[in-house]
Image (cartoon, rainbow, N blue to C red):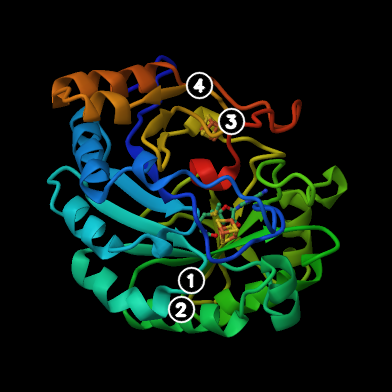
Amino acid sequence: MRDERGREINYLRVSVTDRCNLRCRYCMPEQGIDIKPHEEVLRLEEFARIIAVASEVGIRKVRLTGGEPLVRRNLPELVRMVAAIDRIDDIAITTNGVLFPAMALQLKAAGLHRVNLSLDTLDPKRYRFITRFGHLEAVTRALDLALELEFHPVKVNVVIIRGFNDDEILDFCRLAAERPLHVRFIEFMPVGHLEFWQHDRIMRCEEIRQVIEEQYQLTPGKMSRGNGPAKYYALQGAPGSIGFISPMSNHFCAECNRLRLTADGKLRACLYDCREIDLRGPMREGRDDRYLGELVRQGVRMKPERHLMAENRWQHRDRKMYQIGG
Ligand code: SAM
Ligand code: SF4
Ligand code: SF4
């Protein structure tokens, strides 16, 4: 379905939980996280039903995220249910990777196509600092396994934070130079846990690119599957590629194709727009698929033209990034 600005909306990002087994400094506070009570969070069958309804409205791609999607019990079961929906042709997850090695085979068997692993540093001490208690080796194991099991393409999401990991840009390029990994550099955004956020910690993609081009030749390229807002470049002679996601310096809202579903069943038309449509209430009151489908259409119609992140800071006290689905 097209929205009022002609954008084809075919992608649903689903936050399956607002819980997480890490506490990345830019995303969650160490303590006092506002977790939704169990009864407010959708059951797996409820997620699957909404995704099926959304597929009738035009959704073709689904990404499971959170919070940390792999802490959601029986996640492979949800993948299996989504894979069984005819019109959905692409199922991916975004994960910190910690639990991935233990679940990878089950996820593959259930029908998961792709994995994005979030990894901001290759230094174990820094990893522990930024995630507050993560172990880097769990994520490197996850990367190895994702490649081995051919979750293609395997993407690595790296948020570049000036003064924290900007000296590792070339190390991440080396990953793509040596292995068929798609390393995506993401600009730091004023979303999530703002105590860590500072304007001067943003490093614009243009600047990141200049650092890379001192060492590597980048050729504009295209990804075959799951080509979201990233601009992709091939690294000369390398099996992997490099991508840039620049929500701050060059927002990609004009090409936005997504809706979001929160763990408690609210549909959001934009990460940055506080308006939500409640799907859980009507679903639990017994409304039929047609009614729910109309609510999803309403969500498509209310998509804003673009976000105002550069002009305003994150304004909703009600939800953080991990509660919406990053
Ligand atoms: N827990 C999963 C993970 O970390 O991959 C999925 C949820 S997490 C919120 C999704 C992505 O959002 C991660 O790649 C994370 O680095 C990114 N993210 C979170 N806060 C961010 C911020 N302030 N700026 C840029 N990216 C952010
Ligand atoms: Fe958890 Fe992902 Fe947020 Fe880190 S970025 S705290 S792993 S939800
Ligand atoms: Fe789409 Fe909103 Fe993100 Fe822009 S900010 S790309 S409109 S979700």
Between disc 1 and disc 2, whose residue precedes? 1
Disc 1 C-beta below 8 A from ligand 1: yes
SS category of the residue bearing label 2:
helix
- Which quarter of the frame holds ligand 1? bottom right
Name above or below for residue 268 compared with residue 140: above
Left or right relative to 249: residue 1: left
Q: Position of residue 283 (x, y in %)?
A: 23, 29
Pointer 3 residue = 272
Between disc 1 and disc 3, whose residue precedes? 1
Pick the residue in front: 280 or 95.
280
Pointer 4 residue = 275
Pointer 1 residue = 97
SS category of the residue bearing label 3:
loop
Q: Kindly indicate whether the residue at mark 3 contacts the one at mark 1 (C-beta within 8 angstroms).
A: no
Give the residue type that dot 2 points to.
Ala
Query: Residue drawn 22% across and 61% down?
Result: 77
Between disc 4 and disc 2, whose residue precedes? 2
Left or right relative to 220: residue 290: left
- Disc 2 from disc 3: Cα separation: 31 Å
Give the residue type that dot 3 points to.
Tyr
Q: Kindly indicate whether the residue at mark 2 contacts the one at mark 4 (C-beta within 8 angstroms).
A: no
Pointer 2 residue = 142
